[in-house]
Image (tube, coloured by chain):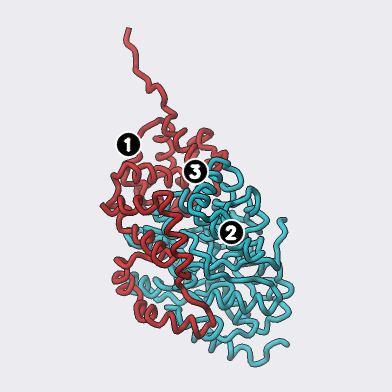
Amino acid sequence: MNFVQIENNPLKLAKKILSDLKASEDMGLLRCVQCGMCTSVCPGAKNSDYNPRDMIEKVLEGEESIINSEKIWNCFYCYTCHSVCPVGSSPCEVNQILRQIAIDKGTVNDKVGPFAGYGDSFLDIGIGSMPKSFFMDLNEDIEGWLNFKSELEEIRETLGLGPITIPTESIKEINTLLKKVGFNKRIEKMKE
Amino acid sequence: MKSIPDKNILLFKSCLVSTEYPGIESSTKYIFDKIGVEYIIDHNQSCCTGLGHYSDIFDQLSTTLIAARNFHIAKKNNAKNVVVMCATCYAINKKSAKLLNKNNQLREKINNVFKESSMEEMEYEKESFNPLDNIFHVVEILFNKRDEIAKHVNMNLSKFRIATHHACHYCKVHYEDTIEGFRNPRILDELLESLSFKTIDWYNTKRSTCGAGFRQRFVNKELSMKVTADKLLELNEKVDILIHMCPNCQMQFDRYQPYLSKQLGIDFNIFHLNITQLIALAIGGDPYKTVGIQTHTVPIEPLIENISENNLHPKE
């Protein structure tokens, strides 16, 4: 008699996702009925080959290859799927967690490396500003954008607003705290 | 409905408000001062991590740790309420407050980090910030004070067609707490109508995201612009003004509208203003010293000139 080998623990990936900090309490991932509402409202699905219903199906089948899928990087994190899911699941949060798993494996530095600057500027000035590597693109697409940036401090003064950068003492605090939870190592690793 | 405060407020600084549309902050302060909402700003407060968080750079532990520090700053100022100007600050702070209250293990871990860093005073006390009763978007504060604001409005916008863009991270993330609907979000429409500014209310792409998509704008521009264009294409013939409640959405539409006009060969003619900027204008705020129109890419001057012509006999 032939036996078909069935994965011992097909829900391992789903359970790992549910236990992640990013997963909302009581997220209905295991209640998914594959209705496809998520895909029908998804801007990523409308304009690319990303399909949140399919992503969830793969997660529930324990198909780990979804972690390395290119397609999941087309999610906008708009939470539209999350807000309409009839069983309270959240493909948007599942997507974020899958990306985090991939980041921890160190296999997607090409995807996240360009954004590590958000971490650097947070440690430098207490604000996660857009990475400088994107500035020239922005300036090309947006007329006068860099000019405006050079006048920003003056404009803020006209508007009666305080400084952009937070005080040195606070920056030190933030650095101490984030170092303790391994944030610096995390972003350095992303840049490798 | 949840009870909305008008005092003991930390007005939470936002990175994109500070660096792209600072007029949102000065407009908010102008309105709050005029209608007697009591608030403080503390420059020690850091950015919420939002852009980095949703670009997958910050993990949830780091983001929640930063939120706990910012909650401490609010508390130190006797502000039990955190009021944000950006939809992503709203989503991030609410999520962190939920985690800090409900996840004992995480809270202890974060409190230990404070202890080991000799910052014991920052330790988070369970339930000290309730995500429903202590964390709000500015729009909610204004909505609650709409009758008071209406008394100060001295502007007629009846010849302009207005639509609203409700930010995803306000409406859809913690949708159970969203007021005035999230399937057909109406808080901006309701607020505008109570100030006698009529909106077109529902339109097909009303619920659609702005298209920024955090990483998408930068590394997947075609995909990002397709989504932004969908809304502009629907609204171009229908409205003159699109009202925003999030600096990232505003950036996506205001900064990239001329770009999309060029790319698609279509003359998009929509003015983009944050709700606080429109209200500040309507109650007498100076366009340059309060509303900050000089940081906009789509010039607001033609709109203001048009409004002035239309308001030769404003209601008093």
Which amino acid type is shown beneath numbered disc 2? Answer: His
Q: Colour of chain A?
A: red
Q: Are marks 1 and 3 on the same chain?
A: yes
Question: Would you say B202 lies left or right of A116 here?
Answer: right
Split into 4 quadrants, where in the image is the C terminus of chain B? bottom right
Residue lying farthest to the front in this orientation: B118
Badge 3: residue crowd in 10 Å (few <14, some 14–19, many ≥20) = some
Looking at the rendered image, the quarter that the N terminus of chain B falls into is bottom right
Report the Cα–Cα distance between label 3 and label 2.
21 Å
Residue at numbered disc 3: A21
Image coordinates of residue A57 in percent, x first then y, are: 42, 35
Q: Is residue A88 above or below residue B276?
A: above
| Amino acid type, mark 3 | Leu
Answer yes or no: is residue B249 visible. Answer: no
What chain is tagged by disc 2? B
Give the secondary structure at mark 3.
Answer: loop
What chain letter is assigned to the residue under label 3?
A
Q: Is residue B103 left or right of residue A163?
A: right
Chain letter of the residue carrying label 1: A
Residue behind mark 2: B72
State the residue position of label 1. A65
Circles 1 and 2: CB atoms closer than 8 Å: no
In the drawing, what numbered circle is on residue A52? Answer: none
Quadrant in the picture for residue A146:
bottom left
Check whether the beta carbons of the residues at disc 3 and disc 2 lie within 8 A of each other: no
Image depth: mark 1 or mark 2 in front: 2
Q: Residues within 10 Å of mark 1 (few under 14, many from 20)?
A: few
Toward the viewer: B111 or B86? B111
> Which chain gets the cyan colouring?
B
